[in-house]
Amino acid sequence: MASSVVKSIISTVREKGLGGFFRYLKDEGYRRCLPDGNLLQTKIHNIGATLVGVDKYGNKYYEKTENTQYGRHRWVEYAEKTRYNASQVPAEWHGWLHFITDHTGDELLLLRPKRYGLDHKENLSGEGDEFIYHSKGHALNPGQRNWTRYQPWESTTKP
Amino acid sequence: MGLGLLASKAMRPTASRLLNFQNPNNLLLRTIVSKPELRKPEPAAAQPEAPLVDLSPRTPVGGARVHFSNPEDAIEVFVDGFPVKIPKGFSVLQACEVAGVDIPRFCYHSRLSIAGNCRMCLVEVEKSPKPVASCAMPALPGMKIKTDTPVAKKAREGVMEFLLMNHPLDCPICDQGGECDLQDQSMAFGSDRGRFTDMKRSVVDKNLGPLVKTVMTRCIQCTRCVRFASEVAGVQDLGMLGRGSGEEIGTYVEKLMTSELSGNVIDICPVGALTSKPFAFKARNWELKGTETIDVTDAVGSNIRIDSRGPEVLRIVPRLNEDINEEWISDKTRFCYDGLKRQRLNDPMIRGPDGRFKPVNWGDALAVVAEAAHQVKPEEIVGISGKLSDAESMIVLKDFLNRMGSNNVWGEGISENTNADLRSGYIMNTSIAGLEKADAFLLVGTQPRVEAAMVNARIRKTVTSNHAKVGYVGPATDFNYDHQHLGTGPQTLVEIAEGRHPFSKIISNAKHPVIIVGAGIFERKDQDAIFAAIETIAKQGNVVRSDWNGLNVLLLHAAQAAALDLGLVPQSEKSLESAKFVYLMGADDTNIDKIPKDAFVVYQGHHGDKSVYRADVILPAAAFSEKEGTYENTEGCTQQTWPAVPTVGDSRDDWKIIRALSEVAGVRLPYDTIGGVRSRLRNVAPNLAQMDEREPAALPSSLRPTFTQKVDPTPFGVAVENFYMTDAITRASKIMAQCSAMLLKK
């Protein structure tokens, strides 16, 4: 296994040059592996696994059936390397990832109703007021309904 | 009729006895007439006589008390075996009410004549071959009335079935739903199924104007509205057309209902045939919060209930007060409420150097006003309270200006030489209910139909029942009762006073003569001479006696009586022309052109009406539906409004604004609760502290010094130009604008 890793590194360096190789390491999040153990563990886990699909946000879905404990054989590597969380998985991949179904997200996406199927939105709680969802009666919803039951006098009108 | 009462009636022992007799074969398939008793209703005489219930006397319906004018006239009847003493002339229905039995009824209304055409009030009377209509049958001594027998039950069920036969099943979309007599009574007395399978009849809706919505298919021909229009409102607009199943209520020719009391037909209609047009489909009656308060659109102070949902006033309905408005209110009172939602002042505003208003906070606005008030001489400060001001705010305004060193504070509609010293000189001494005893009226410069519609309804009631003579001095106007137009100017009064006019004989022959003087006369320069002439007439006609005071003034605005009680009378006419600081507290009918150009004007009020355009600072205040305020009506009865809805925006109660201003201005007033203001009121005018009580004037007005100035021959003016738009609230109302466009005679 170690030899195959070394082989792939050498082939990448040959392909992209040394500068390109370091840029590739940065983009794929290998530099974040140093402070982030979760990411490092995912990267190690990825070795030898099959890439089942990539959703439109760039999240990669892996599966490895051999030599893996059942229930840990499907996982996701988030496209976002620094601020990732489970709400970034879209609905169509959720079922596959959580062993609800064996259909991959790409298959389920074909079933999405065209007229009212909405795009997935991740949960932005804690990311600032402008990202948070407010119901239409909420004071912070910009399209809030006007519940004023009287009409104020306008000072510009003249008798 | 309360549903609880109906339910308790249904649970009486007689009813349960009937249920036990029920044939078990009919349990599954119950037809309309199922019980053996009902199939062959025998007269109740055959049944055991002794009532099975305890014979403790029951309380009359609604806790009413019976007044025996002559104890010898009392007769005794038996209602369901209970002996009841009633005065002679009572109907069977009234006797049952005294006995505590509420008879179902549709056409009967205690204030209207008896029609007897709905047949819902059928009861059994012993030795009578048929059930009798109790509303039209006079009670006779010893009569044995049975309200709970199979005969009566069958009669009610039959009547109800016929009424529902042609009644549409549209309760879910009917505005009367939830407060409908037919709905309630069909629950209590109706059958649980109908046998009618044909087409229901339908009737074309009538256009009765912008206030009353008609769905004539729902009408059950009780003719209450027809009787109301001809007997109380005094307009012959409505009538019954056709016969049999073609019978319908309508105006004979296509025309609108032109009465100032037309809204009351909405209340008396027992079904949803006549409903309120502005309230249509707005709310259900069980969603509403009722607040019992009083009306301020005229000086009568009609008792009303404001029905609101959340921050919105949705309708106004009358409340029973026999002394003031009976159970009617005028259309202005009933439909002015949409004015409370338009043109509201909701933020304190200051006029900037560019002439535009800018919203500011209260602290800044009060600081600007206080600084401006201190920059002028005390005698240049003037305060005017408006038509709708409550007594609390008026006394606080007066106290504040007095502490600033000025005494130039007065109420609208009160002029320099108005006599505020003798209370009998400006209130209705006879009292509104007392007018019913009168047998001759002299109306001087007043058009009661537009100035105070409820007082006019009393006069009409007196004229129709006592055949009282009415003489009228003033500009030509329309009355809804017989009257003699004596003249247009004060010259006629002088003629009557000197005995040269035939009407002076009518007054002196009358037992209970009444003179009503319009408050529009307060604006005249020669009012003292006119009052002197009137007092001469009163003296000759013996109008003011120890047992009868028939000399009245009919005031125009809700605030006027309290303002006069508190002495809000201008010191001199010129003080407004020389004012440098003018405080207008809801004063919209003051001539703002008289205010000098360099004067600083503060407007405190709830509507952006007329005076707001002259103001430099606007302080938003609460309207009558949003505050607790004391008002005195034209007969001297002190009443109180209660807040029904919250204030709008940043507005505050009137007295609180002036109290806060006094502190900013450095002349802190000594009270800071409404209780404190009221104890101050009690010191100035003790009668204003006695809520819901009429305080008669102590001294007769003859103590007034005699005056010998010549009267001015100019005819009397019209005090109220447009009945529907008299103050800031009604002028802001869209419904009132519609009414004045469609209903006023041009």
Image (tube, rainbow, N blue to C red):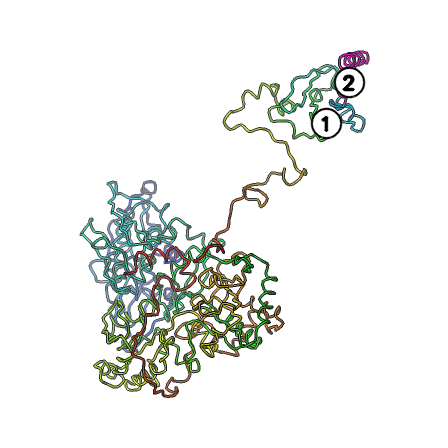
In this rendering, the label closer to the viewer, 1 or 2: 2
| Residue B6, placed above or below residue B677 | above
Can you say which quadrant of the picture contains the C terminus of chain B?
A: bottom left
Q: Residue sitting at 36 percent across and 46 percent down? A: B173
Q: Quadrant of residue B730?
A: bottom left
The prevailing secondary structure element of the residues shown in magenta is: helix
Q: Residue furthest left?
A: B243
Can you say which quadrant of the picture contains the N terminus of chain B?
A: bottom left
Circle 1: residue type: Lys
Find numbered disc 2 in the image and state the secondary structure of the residue it sits on. helix
* Depth check, front residue: B529 or B227: B529
Using a 10 Å C-alpha cutoff, classify the residue at mark 1 as few (fewer than 14 neighbours), some (14 to 19) or many (20 or more): some
| Residue B122, placed above or below residue A132 | below
Q: Label 1, on which residue?
A: A81
Circle 2: residue type: Phe
Q: Position of residue A19 (x, y in %)?
A: 79, 19
In terms of sequence position, does the residue under pointer 1 or pointer 2 come before the other? 2
- Magenta stretch, residue numbers: A1-25
Question: Which numbered tag is attached to residue A21?
Answer: 2
- Is B208 left or right of B410, judged from the image as shown? left
Q: Residue sitting at 26 percent across and 78 percent down? A: B440
Q: Is residue B16 magenta?
A: no
* Depth check, front residue: B89 or B225: B225
Task: Tell me which chain the residue with mark 2 is part of.
Answer: A
Residues marked 1 and 2, same chain? yes
